[in-house]
Amino acid sequence: MIQHETPIQESDLHPDPILEFGKWFQFARDSGLATPDGMTLATAAKDGRPSARIVLLKDFDARGFVFYTHYESRKGLELQANPWAALVFHWDPLKRQVRIEGRVQKAPRAESQQYFNLRPFESRLAAWASQQSDEIPGRQVLEDRVTELRTEYPGDEEVPVPPFWGGYRVVPDRMEFWASRPNRLHDRFCYSRAETGGWRIVRLSP
Ligand SMILES: Cc1cc2nc3c(=O)[nH]c(=O)nc-3n(C[C@H](O)[C@H](O)[C@H](O)COP(=O)(O)O)c2cc1C
């Protein structure tokens, strides 16, 4: 079991970084953090200008790390133009950080619909109502749109997933695990995908 400020040895690491992430994420969840699934998502426009924001990790497995969003938001447009993304988790009380880099793929529609159905009714309407990242003249625009949607969907019935909304899966080709150690001599381990398949693991200077 992972404990606070436990030194990390090469021999402690799982050869698969997604399984190693699973241990760290479980530790973060078990530690009672308010938002262990909050992660910074960095994207970059085609001209190289970066942008970053927090999104929530909704799923992860051997295929990658999934978040849900509006496909025509700023991040969505940037990912359309340049599919490379980076994720950062910072679990401050645990003094740990995980960085993930890779290309994104859109999640299959069925997967997005399945997740969308789990969201509360009001959140499903909000996804329809918000043209995320667009300028709006005032909050009333959103309230009016939700009122209209309530007429369209009067009960807590199935609301279709909006065509402009869904999941992205970040398929990692590089992952880094950072753990604080005294006197800033922290532990850092980087996994990168080897050309032969599998992962190459190296220790990085802090
Ligand atoms: C704790 C937290 C969780 C968030 N989760 C999401 C999320 O899962 N998906 C999302 O699209 N935006 C999420 N947001 C809002 C984003 O940070 C951001 O404001 C929004 O996606 C628009 O970003 P963009 O204009 O760069 O596309 C979250 C914000 C916070 C503070």
Image: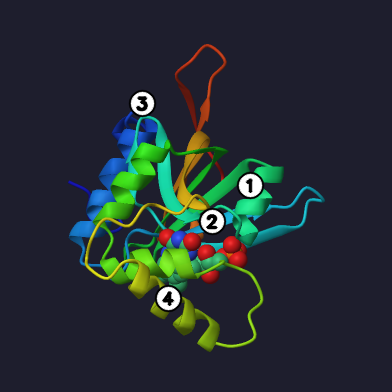
Task: Between label 2 and label 1, give the one nearer the viewer.
Answer: 1
- Residue identifier under label 4: 148
Report, in whole angstroms, how far the alpha carbon at label 2 lies from the one at label 1: 11 Å
Task: Between label 4 and label 3, give the one nearer the viewer.
Answer: 4
Report, in whole angstroms, how far the alpha carbon at label 2 lies from the one at label 4: 32 Å
Q: Position of residue 89 (x, y in %)?
A: 43, 56
In the rendered structure, which disc, 2 or 1, sits on the residue that comes first in sequence?
Answer: 2
x 28%, y 60%: residue: 119
x 59%, y 46%: residue: 85
Label 4, residues with CA under 10 Å away: few <14, some 14-19, many ≥20:
some
Report, in whole angstroms, how far the alpha carbon at label 3 lies from the one at label 2: 25 Å
* Residue closest to the eye, 60 or 168: 168
**Quarter of image, res 159:** bottom left
- Residue identifier under label 3: 15
Beta carbon of the mark 2 residue lies under 8 A of ligand 1? yes
Three-letter code for the amino acid on which mark 1 is drawn = Leu
- Residue identifier under label 2: 41
Question: Is there a contact, CB below 8 Å, between mark 2 and mark 1?
Answer: no
Residue 79, numbered circle: 1
